[in-house]
Image: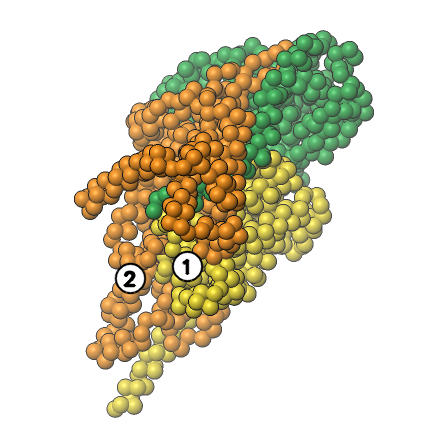
Amino acid sequence: MKKKVLSVLMAGVMTSALLIGCGSSAPAAAPAEEAAPAEEAVEEAAPAEEAAVEAPEINADATGEIKVWVADNVVDFTNKRVADFMEANPEFAGFTVTVEPVGEGDAASNMITDVEAGADIFTFAQDQIARLVSAGALEEVAPQNAAAIKAENDPGSVAAATVGDTLYAYPLTSDNGYFLYYDKSVVTDPSDLDAILADCEAAGKNFYMEINSGWYQTAFFFGTGCTLAYDTDNEGNFTAANVDYASDQGLVAMKEIIKLASSPAFQNGSAAGEATNLAAIVDGTWDSGTLQEVFGDNYACAKLPSFVGSDGKTYQLSGFGGFKLLGVKPQTDEDKLNACDALAAFLAGEETQSLRYEAVGWGPSNLNAQQSDAVKSDVALSALAEQLAFTIPQGQYPGDYWSLATGLGDDVIQGNLTVDSSDDDIMKALQTFQDTCISYAK
Amino acid sequence: MKEEKYGSMSKKRAIGNAISYILLILISIIWLFPFFGLIMQSFRSYSSEYGGMVNYIIPKKFSLDNYRFLMSGETNYLLWYRNTVIIAVIVAILQTIIILCVSYALSRMRFKGRELLMRFWLILGMFPGFLTMICLYFLLKQFGLTQAGAVPGLILVYVASSGMGYYVCKGYFDTIPKALDEAARIDGATRARIFFEMIIPMSKPIIIYTALVAFMAPWCDYIFASYVAFGNDKSYNVAVAMTRWVWTNDYQGYFTRFCAGGILVAIPVTVLFMALQKYYVEGVTGGAVKG
Amino acid sequence: MAAKRKQKSQNIFEALGKDIAEIGTTFVQGDIKTKLSYIIFGIGPLLRGQIVKGLAYLAAELLFIWYMAGFGWKYLSKISTLGTVATQKVGRKTVYGDNSFMILLFGILTIIIIAAIILVWRMNIRENLTEEQLLKAGKTLPTNKRFLSSFLDENFDKTLLALPITGIFVFTVLPIIFMICVAFTNYDANHQSPTNLFTWVGLENFRSLFSFGSNGFAGTFLTVLSWTLIWAFFATFIDYFLGLAVAMLINKKGIKFKKLWRTILVLTIAVPQFVSLLYIMKMFANDGLVNAYLMKWGWITSPIPFWTDPTLAKITIVVVNIWIGIPYMMLIATGLLMNIPEDLYESARIDGANPFQMFWSITLPYMLFVTGPFLLTQFTGNLNNFNVIFLLTQGRPQSMKLTGNAGYTDLLVTWLYKMTVTDTNYKMAAVIGIMVFLVTAVVSLVVYNMLPSVRDEEGFQ
């Protein structure tokens, strides 16, 4: 009886073997490719200075496809810039560039899932960089570009693009920080958190801050003087954690978070486009357009407020200054790598950054672009600049940190930690948080 | 005396019916409310009001902006819609064919290992589908059926595993008397002829049911379809693209557009479902009893 | 039962022994054609004029050799280590080394194909034996045409099942075996093909699933598992009884517009869930429609945390699921209620039973008996009800008490999904997947043995 079943199964097996056999051209080709590089490796290229100028290093006959992943709202802009690039660099005419709308979050996780199928050039938020490096999804910045990038961009953004002591990405924006947007007609004193909340409560409107995000949470902890930072090695591994949340300062910060969450005006969130009945929100420049529409004439921005802690002292909210980065993935074809390097440098260059600011309002990381009048007179960007004095440039954090921080924030929102919790309970939670943070570094 | 009792009975019944009607109306309101909200939301314009969720239900000004946006080509909505329709139609056809084949073989033929095969499939069905997602992705990649080829790739995966969903259809075949087959066989008909010329014409309800269920499923696949498309937005289906509007921060203020798009998705599926409701009921009822 | 099983396993060994013996005797007693067939498949049938059969066997062997030489061996040979050649840089160019993923995947495929070819070989021997015996008995062998046309008649099952079984094998069985194997490797974000290699680690991942402590998954696993079971129980039975009630309400004598009520309810089945549930998610958000109206009317002063409070979120999910589940049950119950013989109620009424008593002693037992299998599939379906949970809460709220990105409303499947997609922690995802299978299998077995109406069902489900 069994044998007959197996015979039926077997028919299936054989057909499938056939199928795989037919489809084997792809996998069979892979090792062939592996073998091929040996000969190509002979023409070992180490282009110096501007890749575009060094004609002998560039193989003008090279062809290929370059895929670029950027957020949906800059696809058109990026396409335009790619066309400009092609015009300015005819030696790369053999390459066709396609731009696909894949946002920063998706791009990073897709790149990690299958680096071969991922984009050749992609944007990502800096918190992903260590993951991307350890998953082998980022190529080092071409040596000929590295020096210029380090010189032209603000130091924070360069640090963000560096893992260990290697520059892995091209800084794109310097505006991944947050500050306060508010409705002038509701909030009278944007410099004090309690006053803001009181105004919102009185008006029956909402104050938004995403306290269950590891990114926004640090506004409180860094504000009271706590530290949370990791050391990384060149492979993107975390070697040590410096964290002191379980301290008196951490307690003050945590209590303030709890107090904030207990306000009836408080809403957890940072997406301006999804907020309702909004009076004030802690958010970044990417939402400035939305908020201008929401608030209309009452649109206003300010640095984050300060608060009077449980110990009676006044603290200014701090937070992360973060950056968007542009990465190139490792390539098996040197000509293509050259093209990708040149294109990435172009897309992250001063001119593109300035134009991008004009097109979609992303604040540049390029020092020259930052000096332009338009950038300087931007309300949101000046609030951010003001806030930047109090923020800490965001370094590298393990992926687990973000979910742990969400856990901490959710514990507050769901009432595991409340205004009535004893200092001991809060301290215990902070101790767990700290210990878990340390356990991520090996 | 008797008449009086009768009268009180009918009075009781009238009260009972009144309560029933109130309950039914209440239920209907609850059931329809989200759809009502969805429709209202879709007519609220981003430019005059706001694109996100708001704290009122009736738009201050009705507009067709969201529908215009979907049709305008600013996004690939129409392409996504087409992808979904293509997937759904082809899957419905192929899946129905496969299920009919499997059901006939399992219902009518008695071959060695039949029980073992059914048991084996039953056990396979206990593994969660998401488990194998990554593996399926790389398998499809071997055949070039991811990213740009995601649409045929998805069809292949949906259809390939559909044989395991034979229960309802086999249950239906089981109710067709075997004596019919035997009579035909005595007349010299082959198994194939019996299948094509006798069983299939008798199975219209179950064919429609199977096709309907197969047609509806791809409309709601926002997980695996997203994985297979792998960032290539030209091969998204509507579910993948539109859940992105809700979940990704890149698309703030797209919620009204989501509602409009959702309604455009819901209309054909709902109309088709309502038209074929009779067969659906027959199928699920039969399936529930048969298991 | 145990004795029966023992007997069964004995039978298997006996059969295996007989089989091997038959292979031997066939070789010894067979003619030269048969003997040759041991090495060249199908040569016996070919020489006896069974061209189609012979060619099929021969083709199988040739295909197998071609496959192994060109493809299979390359992967199979590395399966014990899953690759040793690391990725390296030549200049600035990346040269990828062994791809552990492909080695594992195609290694497994190759093993299965080898098993299959052994079977083909065995069938080929049996075929020779049968043919010899037929010829010896003075009968003629069936013609090639007869053989081919048998696939439309007595062998029609093979024709019908070939394609579906192939499909299921490639896209279900192979991936499942692969993922089971992954549970015994260290395949995760830090060991990601093609850049990094992964390798076998034995039971390491299961150990970490069952270990408490800061990096252990045990506490979280138990929380998620118990919610999964509680959820499945409530989602199944609340919907079942309420659906039944609504069906009876609509079917009540004297109620008009039956079709209208049914159609309204059925809308929730027709509209794709990602549309309706995402809207409901927004509706019940802290800053959503429901809270806004309740506050506007002055019923509450601060928003009700429908999704952010763990207990409330669970309740909300179950309630929203009623909205989805009732119509389905209502449809089924409507059909079945009509099947209950009217005279049962009639005689009960004569005995003076009130409607509740009639429900309790007639309707319910009948429904439970008839829909037993349905309840079982509903229950196992709800154990894996991804859509409702993921569209409503995505498993949130999270907590520091839970590890691995899990939240309080996560089911095992949604947790599995997050591990796969968000954390690319495939090894733990595979372990969780195996756990889901175990839970489903245990529940099904227990319930199956309790249900009288399933056990007698021919062919099980």
Q: Residues within 10 Å of mark 1 (few under 14, many from 20)?
A: some
Q: Position of residue C173 (x, y in %)?
A: 43, 39
Q: Position of residue C424 (x, y in %)?
A: 47, 29
Q: Position of residue C48 (x, y in %)?
A: 48, 43
Q: Is residue A172 visible?
A: yes
Name the residue: 45% across, 51% down: C140
Chain identity of mark 2:
C
Letter of the chain shown green in the rendering = A
Residue topped by disc 1: B108
Q: Quadrant of the N terminus of chain B?
A: bottom left
Asked if the residue at tag 1 contacts the one at tag 2, i.e. Cβ–Cβ closer than 8 Å, the answer is no
Query: What is the secondary structure assignment of the residue under circle 2?
Result: helix
Look at label 1 and name its amino acid: Arg
Q: Position of residue B285 (x, y in %)?
A: 41, 63
In front here: B20 or A259? B20
Residue topped by disc 2: C369
In front here: B147 or C29? C29
Letter of the chain shown yellow in the rendering = B
Q: Are marks 2 and 1 on the same chain?
A: no
Q: Is residue C380 visible?
A: no
Chain identity of mark 1:
B
Please name which of the two marks, 2 or 1, marks the residue nearer to the observer. Answer: 1
Q: Quadrant of the C terminus of chain B?
A: bottom left
